[in-house]
Each structure stands twice: as structure tokens, then as C-alpha cells.
Image (spheres, grey):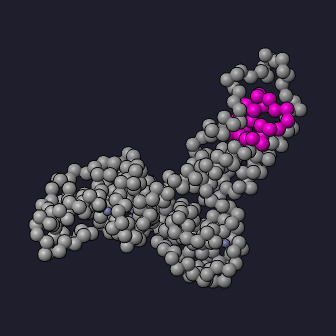
Amino acid sequence: MSDCHDDEDIITVEDAVYEMDAQVEESIAILGASDSDNCTYSLGYMERQALFACKTCDLKGDAGICYACSLTCHQEHDLIELYTKRNIRCDCGNSKFNGFECSLIKNKDLLNEKNAYNHNYKGLYCTCDRPYPDPEEEIEDEMIQCVACEDWYHSRHLGSLLPAEFHEMVCYLCVAKYNFLQYYYNEQVNTPDIDVVSVDKEKESKNTDSHFSLSDTLTNEEKQNKIKKNEEMCKLEKLKHQFVNLGNIDKNVSFYWNDGWRSSLCNCAMCLELYEKNSIPFIIKESDTITFYENKGKEKADNLLKDAANKISSMPIVQQVELARGYQELKSGLQNFLRNFPPNQIVKKEDVESFFEELNERKRRRVTNIPPNNCR
Ligand SMILES: [Zn+2]
Ligand SMILES: [Zn+2]
Ligand SMILES: [Zn+2]
Ligand SMILES: [Zn+2]
Ligand SMILES: [Zn+2]
Ligand SMILES: [Zn+2]
């Protein structure tokens, strides 16, 4: 009978959930960790969240808008997708908005004093201060986000050729600003050719760059002992003495880091203070990475899909053949469904739910017409 299915065709919906195309997964990852119903204002300055800026609202200065507010308060507005940013409290409806009210949370402080903005909130990126996509630019270029300043850069404006693979990037402006990072140059994917010059310890003891000052009243031997002790306590001190004549590092080259570079940074009390003083305490935290954030989103999206799959497979009179068909429908349907959204538009939880409801409706109608059991 032509209606029969081979065993190979039979895949359960649960299998299908795990076989979802990477593309579909990707599109859920960034927003998956976000709450589509509740403004994040009450959660304060969040470690990381998906953020938006509004071109429609009449703003005094820059403002960051959370995911839920982008969906409700600014639904029909022209939004700039900012991907994710750290340490921002939702500005929607505060004094920057000239009387426009947030429909989710009414009583907000007039300003979020700790929010820091860059030109991304105006839709501009990179050292060239251009929009993206750029209507006046014909050559397409990849944009890379610096994990320190969070600005996005054209790969051609980062000072060196983009390596084929890397985990995170710190732009050359930030490498110069937080120059202690240069001592960790070995944690890059392509370690640059640098003349490694062992520093004369005697000379180094006068180095003002050090955490630790050495009193002039110490004898040479005492100084050497103290330096040795400092090096045992602090990896950065050790690196400073071990290697490098940093003068040989090209000042206009960005750093492309290996996976795990953050955990290679020293976390002694002095270094923690150094990160704090430079307002980058997040630099040693794995939970600050985009990868960590995306995995959180994927996990949440995965649970949502698993739930849906369970709902489908617990339906009455569902047979393997039906499930195989369900798999195809789920896969192509969800892809089409996501494809119908313009790139800047946001997919709501309700949208996904109604998609599954519709799918279930179709299945319910068809179970009255299943192929006979004796077909093989
Ligand atoms: Zn909000
Ligand atoms: Zn708006
Ligand atoms: Zn709002
Ligand atoms: Zn640029
Ligand atoms: Zn930077
Ligand atoms: Zn240290």
C-alpha cells in the first residue's frame, strides 16, 4: 500500500525536538532567556539582557528598553536591536521619555544613574561611527562585539586580520585602556610574534606599574625575596616579571581570546581590586559571557519545545506514523513560522504557543483518518 511508511521515516516528536535546525535554535537563543511579559526594571541592573533602543519615541538622551517593554510599550515603534548589554536597568517611561509612560511598571526612578550608554543606542557602531547595515557601504563586513566596552566593530577596523576561530574579542582601544590585559597575550588564539625579553629584576623592582611598592630601605636580597613572594601571590606580577617587553606589542591590534581566557586572569585580592577600579569586575566571570547567556536561553527554549512535544505525544490515539508526520510538520512548520517574522521583529511566547495549538488542531482533525494497522 502506498500509504505505508518505512521504519526509517518514523521519528518521534521528542527526537525531533533535539534535531531542530541550529538556525532555529540560534534565533531563540538570544531572546529565549528573556521574559516577554514582565519589565525587568524591578530586577535592577541586570548582569546581561536583550535590549532595544527606540527611534520613534521622543527621547532626551539615550535609553535602554527591555524585551517585554519592546513588545508592549513600543510595539509599533521603530526599534534598534542592541543584542545584549550588561548592567542596564530598563529606562522605558522614565524622565527621558518626555511624558511617555511604561505600561508595565508605572513608578520608576526619574533616571537610572548607573546606566552607561554608547553610540549603539543611536544606531551607530565602531570607530567609524556608522549605522549597521550601512546604506553607503557596499563591502559587507562582519561586526564583532568587544567584551569590555560592548561596542561593535567592523572586522576591518580592528587592526588585524580576523582569526578563523576565537572565543571573545577585546578591541585595541580597550587593550590600551586596560593595559594589564596585554600581559596575558599568551591566552590569544594566535599568539603574536613578540621578542620575549626577560626583564632585569633589579630594574623591575623600581617598576611603578607593580601592585606592590618596594621600599628603598630594603636590601637587594630583601627586595628579591619580596618580589618572589609577590609573584607567588599574583599571576599578573609573575607574568610581568617573566616575560614581556610590552613595547613590542602592536598598540593598534585587538586581542582575540581562547576559550577559558577569563579563568586564566589572576583573581588575587589585588587584581580583583584592579578590575573593580577599572569598572570591569565582570571580566573574570564566565557568567558574563554571551555563550553563558545563550545557553540559558537555549535551555529555556528547549524546555518550552519539550513541553509542547509532550502535549502532542500525550494526545489520544496517536501512532508512530502520526508522530512521524508530526515531526515533519513541527520542523517545517516552525521554520516557516519563524521565517515569517521580519528579522527585527520579536517572537512572543504566545506566538509559539498558538503555533503549537494550531498544529494540534490539525492533528486532531487527521487522527480520524489514520492508515490501517495491517498495512505492513
Ligand atoms: Zn522594561
Ligand atoms: Zn518607543
Ligand atoms: Zn515599558
Ligand atoms: Zn567601522
Ligand atoms: Zn572595547
Ligand atoms: Zn593578581
Point out residue 86 in the picture as x, y percentages from the top left corner: 51, 66
In this rendering, would 26 be left or right of 146? right
| Quarter of the figure with residue 93 | bottom right
Name the quadrant of the C terminus. top right
Main SS of residues in magenta:
helix
**Residue beneath the point at 70% across and 78% down:** 106
Point out residue 363 in the picture as x, y percentages from the top left corner: 82, 38
**Numbered range of the magenta stretch:** 309-331
Where in the image, quadrant-wise, is ligand 6 located? bottom left
The front one of 338 and 15 is 15
In this rendering, would 91 be left or right of 234? right
Name the quadrant of the N terminus. top right
Point out residue 329 in the picture as x, y percentages from the top left corner: 73, 38
In this rendering, would 90 be left or right of 358? left
Measured along the vertical axis of the image, is residue 46 above or below residue 98? Answer: above
| Quarter of the figure with residue 107 | bottom right
Measured along the vertical axis of the image, is residue 116 above or below residue 285? Answer: below
Q: How many marks?
A: 0
